[in-house]
Image (cartoon, grey):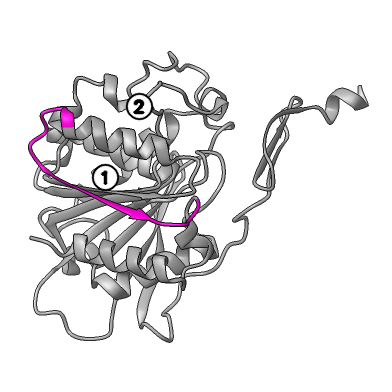
Amino acid sequence: MESTKNEVEFELPSYFRAYKDGRVERLFDTDRVPPSTHSDTSVSSKDILISPETTVSARLFKPTTKPQPQKLPLLIYFHGGAFCYGSAFCATYHNHLTSLVAEANVIAVSVEYRLAPEHPVPVAYEDSWAALKWVASHRDGQGPEPWLNDCADLRRVFVAGDSAGGNIAHNMAVQAAVEPEDLAGMKLLGACLINPGFANKQGDFHELWRFVCPTTTGSDDPRINPAVDPRLSRLACSRVLVCVAENDGARDGGLFYYESLGKSGWGGVLEILDSPNEGHVFHLVNPTCENAVILLKKMASFLNQV
C-alpha cells in the first residue's frame, strides 16, 4: 500500500508532480503576493472575485503615474504553467504584469483560472471565457468594477498569455468569433501569444496534454492543433503577435501556429518576434535581460497600435 501511495502518475520535474493516489504537488510559483501600489512604477493592483460559484478571480492592474486624457486599452492576460500550476497571484506574474502595465500604459486583468488535474481542461477555457464575459459586462460603464468602468476602453481589448496561457488566449479569440453575442459591446483588437503551447507540424504534442485533458481526441484536437480547426480563419481579432525563442522546446509549435494562421485565410496582420539564444518563458525567469526588455517593449507597442 505504501509503495502505491508514492507512485507518480505524471511529473514535470521541478514544477509539478501528481501521484496515483490523487495527491498533487505544485513545486513552482506557489507563493502568493498581495496586491499593492508599486513604489517604482506607481502601478496599482487589486484582486476581484469574478464568480463565487466557481471561484474564478483575477488581479487587476492600473497605472497611476499621471492623469489619463482618455480611457486606456485593456489587456486580459492568462498565466502559463502547463494548465496545472502557476497563478495570477504569484510574484512572477504580479511583477510581469506590473512591468507591462507601466511600460504600455494599459489596464490589465490577470485571470486566475482553475488548474488541472483537479479541474481538467476544458475548465481552464471555461473559466477564461467567464472572465471575458465579466469584462464585457462593463460595456456601458455600469459593470461591477469601477476601474474598468472608469478607465478601460472596451473598444480596444487584447488577450495575451505565455505557454499554456498563450494557448488559452488563442482559444478565447476563436470562441469570440463563434459566440460574439456574449461579448457584445466589447471589441477584441489583438492577441499576443508568448512561447505558446501547441502541437508541431507533425501533430506531436507532449503527453502533458493528455494528462490535463483526458477527453482529448488526440492530434486532431483543434484546441492544441489549430491547423485542423476550420474556425481558424475566423479569429476574432485583427492583429496577432506570436513570440518564440530559439532554445524553447515549444518553439516548433509556435512556428507552426504562425504558419497555419498565415495560410488559413484570416485577413489580419500577423507578426512574429524570435528571441535568439533564449529558452521557454525566459522573460519571466530573467526579466531584466536584453531580450526580455525587447520583448516587453514589443508587447507594449503591440498593445498601443490603433
- The amino acid at mark 1 is Leu
SS category of the residue bearing label 1: helix
Q: Earlier in the sequence, mark 2 or mark 1?
A: 1
- State the residue in front, 81 or 261: 261
Q: Is residue 175 visible?
A: no
> Toward the viewer: 179 or 300?
300
Which residue is depicted at the point 41% across and 66% down?
292
Specify the quadrant that holds the C terminus: bottom left
Mark 2: give few (<14), some (14-19) or many (20+) Cα within 10 Å. Answer: many
Amino acid type for the residue under numbered disc 2:
Arg
In the image, 48 versus 28, the foreground residue is 28
Q: In terms of image quadrants, where is residue 40?
A: bottom left
Which residue is the site of mark 1?
132
118 in the magenta segment:
no
Mark 2 or mark 1, whichever is nearer to me: 2
Q: Position of residue 12 (x, y in %)?
A: 65, 39
Q: Horizontally, is 250 left or right of 171 in the view? A: right
Is 268 magenta? The answer is yes
Image height check: is 69 above or below 259? Answer: below
Extent of the magenta region = 263-279
Residue lying at 33% horizontally and 38% vertically, measured from the top left: 255
Find disc 2 in the rendering and name its residue. Answer: 223
Hey, which quadrant is residue 46 in on the image? bottom left
Q: In the image, 266: left or right of 194?
A: left
Q: Position of residue 212 (x, y in %)?
A: 53, 29
Q: Relative to 182, is 4 above or below?
A: above
Image spot of residue 187 (x, y percent):
11, 48
